[in-house]
Amino acid sequence: MAQAADAVEARLRGAAAEFDRPLLLTPRENLAGYAGSHVGRAALFLVTATSVVAVLLIFVFIIREAVAFFINPAALPPLDPTSAASVLAWAQAALGSIGARLAELLGGTQWYPQAASPEFGVLAILVGSSYVTGGALLIAVPVGLLAAVCLSDILPFGARQAVKPVVEILAAIPSVAYGFFAVLVLAPWMQEHLHISTGTNALNAAVILAVMAIPTIVSVSEDSLTAVGRELREASYACGATRAETMVKVIIPAAHSGIIAAVILGMMRAIGETMVVWMASGMAAQVPSPWWNLAQSVRTLTGTIAQEMGETVIGSPHYHALFVLGLVLLVFTFGLNLVTETLLGRMRRQGGKKT
Amino acid sequence: MPYKREMLGVEMVLATTGIATVMAVAACFAMGAEAEKKTLQIEGSSTVGPIAEAFAEAFMEANPNVQMTVKMTGSGDGAAALIDGRCQIATMSRSMKPAEYQKAVEKNVTPCPHAVAMDGVCAVVHPSNPLTAITRVLLRDIYTGEISNWKDLGGPDMPIVVISRDTSSGTYEVFAEKVMGKDKMSEKVEYVNSNPQAQARVKTTAGAVGYVGLGFLDASVKALTVDGVVPTRKTIATGVYPISRPLFLFTNGYPELGTTAHAFCTFFLTEKGQEIIEAKGFVPLTNY
């Protein structure tokens, strides 16, 4: 014991020039401290791992339920691993069933899962989801970005302090309240003033989703615009640039990573939103005709799952088909995340080269 | 929550019974018999479920020693539960199918239906629509998309906005069964997820047609006569109005008179029972 204490003493003296105490104690020097640091590290690791494990489990669960839509084990020939012919026949039947189901999903726009002869054509629903999300972004990105610029560079600081919390309150309104607004106020207004025959349509859902995405976009991009700092702005003015030139050519490019992150966050909100699109989009499983006609009712992935999951028979093809929709949604958001991550990384590197 | 207080009451009665056992045999006998908990399992349709749930609540309030659980899964599941003995009362929004009866008889169960209420669905249009009457065939043609403009029905030149309830609702079931038959709704049909929302959409859309339960009718929408019959409590209760169906409780044989199950299955005849049925948007079974 005494020796160990001496060793600590020696190391402390050696390190005293830079540090008060050694960075890491060996178990012989300080058992309690050593154990404590490792237990703490393990606990923190577990907490961090929980969220990753949760995501993985969600993937596993949804994939498992979705796969059952493509392959029905009961309908396949018996699998005998010892005979090559049996394995071949089984694989052929499985592939055939997967192919047939895929063709059914992607080959049709008819979604009649509860009919006597069910049809699972998912195209119309995919189109609906992308129309509503795309429409929402078309409105929300310019509005949100301009509002952020206005808040960060044009309004006096006091006004910004007052306005920003109000914008953020928009994000706290429950989506069902937005839904009621869409059905009871916006839909009749569209019918009366835009002469659209039905007020619950893709445009309505897109407008409401845009309003819901704007607070996120404003808040996050305003933060990144402010974070650019005084030096760049003053340097730009010193070079003789006007305020508009400074904004467009200096500040926004400098804050681009934060702005892209803001857009992605807003997009995630729009894709995953359920209650509002369920109420505002009209839920008609059709591809609008002509294709650009946003004034027609559409149906989204989230709305379909919410509407139909309640009373499907568990284990039926309809039930598994809804999980396929869920998987599509998950893959979509996951893919978007990956794309933006790589995009952000590349832009950062390019930015680095220039300076 | 008065219901929770009743539960505490039961426990107190039980506790008192325990003490009484020690103190006096006679007292124990009387109170013990009263405090014996009877449980009743109710399972099945999510359309009849809310009625059964409200019945059970009112019932337990009046009889604190009765414990009831109401599960809402689906009519088919209710039938299976009754046949397997998992419940004493099955709630069903349709009658049992021959195959279910056969299975029941094989398991020595005699399913006995009790119609407790009628579920009537009214076709509604915007008040400005000149149309007042429609037939089930024309309604079907509207919902399949064969008729898509009001001028084909003698109304103004205006596209029809067709509104349906979501496919997992009981209201949709009635409509699909009594109007659509084997035909599929057009892909242009819009879906809403509640009766009030369907009513709101029709109220605010000039070209809309929709359908709601009778309890959700008011002056802001116009109910059409179907096959010449005006939807009212009387026409639905007497079965004259075509888009309606009875709602059932099923028991194993007619419940023994005087039992809790018997009282429960006849609860719809009481004033309170009829109030509950009407409050849930259904039509009580009366003939006045």
Image: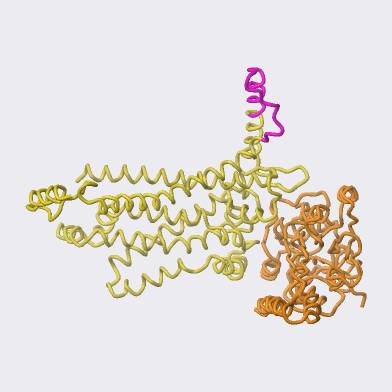
For image coordinates 38% across by 62% down, the residue present is A218
Q: Where is residue A110 in the image (x, y as percent from the top left)?
A: 68, 45
Is residue A97 placed above or below B220 in the rendered structure?
above
For image coordinates 46% across by 53% down, the residue present is A268
- Is most of the magenta stretch helix, strand or loop? helix
What colour scheme has been applied to the protein in the rendered image?
Answer: by chain
Q: Colour of chain A?
A: yellow
Give the side of residue A344 with respect to residue A13, left or right.
right
Is residue B152 placed above or below A122 in the rendered structure?
below
Q: Where is residue A69 in the image (x, y as percent from the top left)?
A: 65, 40
User: As rendered, which of B154 and B110 lies closer to the eye?
Assistant: B110
Q: Colour of chain B?
A: orange
User: As rendered, which of A64 and A32 lies closer to the eye?
Assistant: A32
User: As rendered, which of A274 and B132 lies closer to the eye?
Assistant: A274
Give the side of residue A307 with respect to residue A250, left or right.
right
Report the magenta residues as a range: A72-94
User: As rendered, which of B9 and A31 lies closer to the eye?
Assistant: A31
Q: Position of residue B223 (x, y in %)?
A: 79, 70
Is residue B97 placed above or below B249 in the rendered structure?
above
